[in-house]
Amino acid sequence: MLIKLRDKYRSWRLKRHVQKWGSKNKGYFQCFDQKIFDWQKQLIWLLNTPYVRVWFRHKLRIDQDKESKGKLIAEIRPDKYFINNNDGTRTMVVRTHHKYSKRLYYGFFPVWWMLHFLDWLLFERWMPELSFGFDTLTAYPDADPESDAVDGYIDCLSFSSWTACRDAATGNNAYPSNDRVRVRTRKINEEGSDIWQILRGFECFNTNASGGTATAGVLQNYLDSKYGESVTTYSVDASIDSNTNLTTSDYNNLGSVNYGSVNPSSSGYQDITLNENGIANIDLQGVSKFALRIYSDYQNVEPNTGEDNDVIYYSADYTGTSNDPKLVVTYTLPAGQKSQMVV
């Protein structure tokens, strides 16, 4: 009963947020800003200390990442964490949104509010030297478009031809806040008229690691469902106008340079191992953008009448934290900089 009430409350809050801001990725979020991640020593202790780390990693849902199993975490930020490798390289696991900020906020909600109350009632007024620093609890993420990232999809419908649909400058609808990322091609006939439809996915990741050179990368999307025979998903270059929003004008802001592909299995994360082109697309000083295209769209193979190829992945907006899109990057540090761990 309580779980149902909680889910209804979350659904209501999400609906209100979208009505106010027009997107899940804009406006007010209840999460912490970068300041709480200045407590690296304490966070790393919780993430790496035996027994304690089992509990704390579960709270942040890091325990479900295969990249972190049996590894010490060197650093954590609002949307990513880092692991030092034995060969001197680093691995960075990146989410499309500020997931770890939100998990810290909601996972320890009673604790933060207790500290906030003590700061407000006593310490900030009478004993500032004892303040926990929680006089202001809820953070408003920076409006800078590179402070967060978007994932979603855009569709296009054409009544004239396959080519017109595939090469259209703009799409019909953009879904930057949907809880799925979808790629699809289909052709139907209604009342003697052919109709073509293409859906394309887009994903951005804040991969700022203060420089370095990427040596490997894996784009991971969690499969919801698939339909059809030709469902291979290709990752390609994207040049969308904003890092935090999608519009119909972004429909054709993508290319044909293949970064890697996957033929989705029955469930779980579907890994696209990035080739040299995909690795070169990773921006270790900014935001890395990727687009997803299904087989017939990428290969320019017009589907037959009645043919429908559809792959649906979970987006970062899906309720919960275990199905988020991920980008796992291995990179070498800039010259003269050594791998370090806060202890």
Image: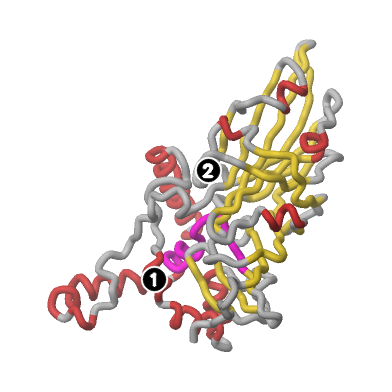
Q: Amino acid at mark 2?
A: Ser
> What's the distance in space between the residues labelled 2 and 1, CA to CA?
27 Å
Say which element carries label 2.
Answer: loop
Say which element carries label 1.
Answer: helix
The mark lying in front, picked from 2 and 1, is: 1
- Residue 49 in percent (x, y) is at 54, 87
Q: How was the colour assigned to the protein in this rendering?
A: secondary structure
First to last magenta residue range: 92-106
- Residue 69 in percent (x, y) is at 67, 77
Task: Identify the residue at image location x=52%, y=62%.
Answer: 79
- Residue 267 in percent (x, y) is at 76, 56
Q: Amino acid at mark 1?
A: Ile
> Where 270 sits versus 17, above or below?
below
Q: Earlier in the sequence, mark 2 or mark 1?
A: 1
Task: Identify the residue at image location x=40%, y=74%.
Answer: 38
Residue at which label 1 appears? 36
